[in-house]
Image: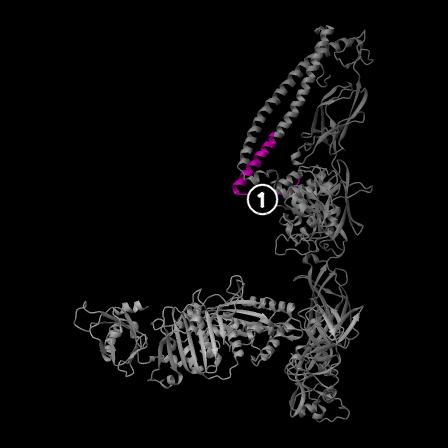
Amino acid sequence: MEDNFHRRGLKRKLILDDEDDDSNQVIRFKVLLPNGTSVGLTLKEKEQEISFQRFIGLIRGEYEVVRRQSESFKRKKKINWNSESLYLEDAHERKASSRINLRHFQPHKCHILRLHNMWDLTPDTDLLMELPEEYTFESALADLIDNSLQAVWLNGKNDRRLISVDVLKNKISIFDTGPGMDNSDENSIVKWGKMGASLNRLCKVRAIGCKPPYLMPFFGMFGYGGPIASMHLGSCAIVSSKTKESKKVYMLRFSREALLNNSGSECTWKTDGGIRDPSEGEIEKSPQGSFTKVVILNPKVKNLDISKLQCKLKDIYFPYIQCDELSKDGRTITPVEFQVNGVDLTEIEGGEVAITNLLSCNGPEFTILLSFSLKQEKFATTVPGSKASQTANARLKCIYFPIRQGKENIERVLERLDAEGCGARENFENFARVSIRRLGRLLPDSRWALLPFMDFRQRKGEKSHLLKRCCLRVKCFVETDAGFNPMPSKTDLAQHSPFSTALKNFGSRSWDEEKDVDVEIYRDGRKLTFLQLEREYQDWLLRMHDSYDEEIESGEDHPVVLVSPLKNKAQGITSNVVRVHQILKRKGAFWKSGQKIKILKGAYQGCHKNNVYATIEYFLIEGLQGDSGGEARIICRPLGRENGCILSSNDGNPSLDIRDSLSLPVSVIDSRKCVAIDDADWERQLEKQSRKTPSTIDLLNVKQCQELEVEGALPTDASVHAGQAPPGEIVAVLRPSNFSLSGASDDLDQRDIVKINLDMSMEVKFSRTKKHQAKHVCSVRIAPSSCKGIHGLYIFPIGCEFPRLFQKAGVYTFSFSIEHSGCQNYMQNVLVVPSQKVGKWQLLSDGNIPFYDARVGSCFPPFSIACYDIYDNQMPFTTIPNFKIRLIMNEVFSVDVTKMKSSLSSDNLVLNIEDVIIECSELDSIRPHYAATLMIYLQDKSATISVKCHVIPGALHRIEACSQLIGSQLLPGSVIEQFVLEMFDAYGNHVAEGLEVQFHLDGFSIQGQICSKYKADDHGCIDLGGLLKVTAGYGKPVFLCVLHDDEVAFKQAFLTENRELRITSRVPELCIAGSTLENLGFEVVDSNGTVDKTFHDDEMRGQFHTLMVKSESFKTDNSVRYAFRHGRCNITSFSLPQIEGPICLKALHSCHPELYCYVKISLVGAPKVESDEFLTPYSDGKVLFLQNSPSVKNDNVGSLLSLVKLKYEKELEIEVCKYGERVGKWENLLKDLDGQKTGIEHRISALQASLEPNLKNNLDCLSTKEEMMKMIKGRGHSAASILCRLLQGPGMHVTEFVVGVVCLLGTVRTVKLSRILAEYLGEDLMLAVVCKTYDAARALEQYEHNGEVDSKLGLHAEATAVGKSVSGRFHVACLEDIRPYLGEVEVSDRQRKLLLPDPRLPSGNHPPGFIGYAVNLINLEHPKINYMTDSGHGLRETLLYGLFGELQVYETREHMENARACIKHGAVSLDGGIRRENGVISLAYRQPEIYFPVQMDVSPKSKEILKQIKEKKLELNSILQQMQKLNVNRAKSLKKFNKTKMKLEKYLDDQRVLGYNSEYAPNTPMSAELSLR
């Protein structure tokens, strides 16, 4: 530091003589000036002495040069160079004011001189305006300690941090081991004494934003703490300070009186100083060699209690004395040594902080961090770049002080403080529950009440009474950084600071509307909203109460324990266990059941105006004995209430009903707002209450109301007409018990009226008659008022509030009552009758718009007509009025009604019209709705009533047929294109739509109609055109019969066309057994003998015309069919049996067995070769004719045999060649098709390779719904196959109530899921038919009388119509009979999935691998997803839930096995595992053919590839089918070839053996019509 000043002084040399520089030695000076600056001065040693004035002039000249060059010098105070009090002082404290002896200064060394005109301590004028008005002793002493604490805080790690305070009678000493001060500019001791000169307050910005508890003691705010505090404490102050670098101790002395005397607008404050050596005690206390010591002489305070001072200072600087937040391991350390009169403050046990810490609970603290910042628009008012003016931070630490053994710990704190003499004149109610530390220093006067967010005393709702008590057991310790400004005395936060205001209002409504400051809340690193903070703080309060509060351990008697007591809200109890006592000890006094008490006003909610006198009944204590957190309540019955608390027991279970008693917190005893009273006071209260007790309620009459100038009184006449104005006001009063109505006068007397502060209620009810139940009209509740000097009047406004009160006819009941008064309710009735002015006529109904349904020729329902006055009141009839009825159907047709009866009701209020009959034949004009209007004209049409009605036709009377059947030809299997049955009632109207009739058909069937019942359409007809099909055979009688109500309404018979089957080929009468008939021809002709070419077999068009041959003589193959072609059928070959004798062949139509003909043939055995006979060419013994046959001449046998042999050889050769050519032809075709098959297979493989892997592996299950339906249709004889055919055709009655097949109702997302669900259900259930109703299910199959299935009805009839049949059993699901799922469904989900809870293992966790419930994994197809049963349940809730139940689906078998504990209704896994509900496990694996279609996301490119694959597969299937047929043909041809070849070879071998030649060959040809083999 000295070198710096030296270099600054070398800027200019001052030479005092003319000698050479080298001949004289140089003396350098460093001169310290009174305004805190310094200059350098260099002299050559030419003279031994120099005058003081000249030396001062040199110093002044040097100062002026530096001042002109430095801006900082210009801002310094001016120096009075002409002052007579100037003098110089060297380091040895030698003073000079006349001559300067230069011989005392060694050359070539810098000597420090101090220029004195007394040190200038004059503060800035602005600082004088900010001085605190007054200090307390502790505040002033704390200001000096603040300076010491800030100083020692700057020490190094190894330096001692000590603050020692000694308070004696004659002086006060404050010693610290801080860095100290000297005479340098930067560290000048002058700054300590000069107000505003210290720059420590500029360090404030460093103390903003640091971590809690903000221990950074940069307390300086104004720069005048030291001098002001010193002048406040004593008359004189001596400041001594030393730095590590300086060897001397610099001193500053000033007197309070001298400074104040010299103060003024034109005066300056000046004081003296000095330099000395450090004492041994100072060196001992400060090993590092730096310190500051302030000694206050002649202190003002006398007889100071040192122990209280020690406690007070420990409270103020507690975190700097003991702190456990600065060490990393949580140990308590001592950041600064504090000593007061030689006693270390860490050893002091007293003080408010120590006591509160001792008596707080050990539970968790509630700590939050608050970050305050000025809003953007407020930055303009702050100093630019000043962080201190923009942000502030605070930590709020809430600590709970529980109640123990019936006494609040806060009260114990106050008692301890009073005992130590540190009491703050506070009690439990006004105890300061917020204390504030700024930078770790306590602000002693910042003793605030609860912060708004902590205050629950005004809260309402559940547990509010508990929170109101618990919130008073919390104290909040607030720690702030330097962003908060204190008051000048540092005893509290600055009142007008925006941050102080925001903190004080934190949580209040005004805080919510804070416009200047933004506040962010953090807790445990989480940012909170205020609502979250409020909820977490409330939860913390309740936890603290439950864990640490001990409201009252027990009463003084044996308790009755209540478990789950009723009416907790009325009792003020939150616990599920309550002990009931009759004796309680509180505050040293006993309180007992039956004791009389007085509860002072304001003691509890609802007791604000008057004191309440009551009798103690019970004491309620929450929890069991020993439980913490229990609350105590006093149950007492107020004076005048009869329904007190009842403690009862039912089967050993006690219960408590509080009824009209009060439940008070036991704290009313602690607050002395509940006091015991003696019997005399109680009797006085009883007497006083009896005098004020009202007896009855009464109404003032008209005269009395007029006396009060009140308009009104209830009418007293027998009745009033509707519309009469109600009274303007009704006046009710309370009569005392000594009031007698008989002896009372009509004049008003206050003695007859009780004045009581209770509200009276008036309720008006209305009933049409005394028998009807009264309904509420209005109610009014008012307080008593005064009028004309009469008090206790209850004046109810009626006329102005309810001007239409008497417009309805009936009985009005006025009821007056007062709660808790002991008076009975007063009632008065007013009878209102209808007005005499007629308003309207109206048809009576049940509240809905009247609408009548009637059948022509039958009676209408009775009509009830009433007459109403202008106020809508029903008026009585005097006589039956004249009236007329007309039915108006439309603008053209109307009918007068003449048949009716009329009468009046017994009370003459209703005109009844009965037995109204409509006779009309024009109802077809208003079809199909039959809407008409029945007009009732009253009193010569002066009034009319219109009745909307439906007039429907009468019962079925006759049926007429409009058809082409008459004169037309009926062919079996044909459909009648035009056949309409018109049905009429007895009046010639077509019957109504929906009329049901029953058909009895013989030879007919109705397509699409399962049952025999049919309904009329909207035209009253049944149109069977295109539906009526002839099922009888050819030439059969048929008839159609219609029944209604089991009676025949229509019957008509017909005859079908006649057809005949005949053979066209000539058949020989004699044939060899085992031979073959060839080219047998048959034809079907009509009655004219013309061939009917419609007999043509075409399976594609559904025409099945084939011929079959049967015989009773031998077994035939009934599966062999021969097709008709345009009316003819040719049997190319028919093998005869190996039997002899006559046989009969029956050729018949396969579908029309009535078309048949017989072929009769006689079969003979082949001749056998004997010794005298010729051998036949057959090795098997077959012969054409026997030589000895009596039917053949012997002379023709030889020629016949020769002819047969030659012909046989040639035919064998031809057939061998023919069959050989056929085999070659089939093989060539097979070779070509095999090449095509190979090419297609290669193409399919290439297309499959280009697919995505998930599609490539699942091609077998990617069938669409249409492909699956085609697969089902391939199962020709199943019910599902027939149903799929019908569903794809035109709409038929058989499919009207059928939903579909199970496997076609929905899709799944994966192939594995589709396979496993199909395997779980099985193929029978997958192909089950789903019907809406049970009737629809029964109609699918009808039975004959013997119990066999009737194939002419139901689904079997439809199968027969398409040439199919239903074989085997099939399942049908009836939705209305399935027990539905009754739980909740996901309404927002379009699929309406069931809300089933996920399974849980015994550990509570969800099982791994669980995918979902099978019932929710099937996506229903549109429009099946919208189907609902009559009870409102969908397919998922009925069918799918009935099939799968709560079947669980897992990824693997391992997952399923691990979840066995939570599987109740079975489970499956995607890898094939099946566990059923009954414990059965399905093992092995099966590939189902019928499964749910899989709906996968496929790209457009893959869709095109799949389309090509399907086309190729169809092409491949077609080729395979052709190859299959060719292989069959080849096998047949090859078999015939081999057989014929063997016959030829055998024949040739036989000829070689016999030597047969051709000379015996006959010359006559064989018959072309019959080949013999």
User: Is residue 1002 visible in the rendered structure shown here?
Assistant: yes
Q: Quadrant of the C terminus?
A: top right
Could you say which is closer to the camera, residue 793 or residue 1353? 793
Q: Name the dominant secondary structure of the magenta segment.
A: helix
Q: Which residue is mark 1?
A: 1496
Does the magenta segment cover residue 1397? no
| Mark 1 neighbour density, 10 Å: few (under 14) some (14–19) many (20 or more) | some
Would you identify the image quadrant in which residue 578 lies?
A: bottom right
Question: Residue 2, image x and y in percent?
Answer: 31, 69
Q: How is the image coloured?
A: one colour
User: Is residue 960 visible in the rendered structure shown here?
Assistant: no
Tell me: 878 left or right of 238.
right
Question: Residue 1055, image x and y in percent?
Answer: 76, 39
Q: Looking at the image, is 870 positioned above or below residue 1410?
A: below
Would you identify the image quadrant in which residue 863 lies?
A: bottom right
Count of all numbered marks drawn on residues in the image: 1
Question: Residue 385, image x and y in percent?
Answer: 39, 68
Q: Secondary structure at mark 1?
A: loop
Question: Residue 344, image x and y in percent?
Answer: 51, 72
Tell me: 26 left or right of 1291.
left
Q: Quadrant of the N terminus?
A: bottom left
Could you say which is closer to the camera, residue 799 or residue 704? 704
Could you say which is closer to the camera, residue 1032 or residue 901? 1032
> What range is drawn magenta here?
1490-1519
Q: Looking at the image, is 739 positioned above or below residue 1385?
A: below
Would you identify the image quadrant in which residue 245 lies?
A: bottom left
Say what amino acid the circle numbered 1 marks: Met
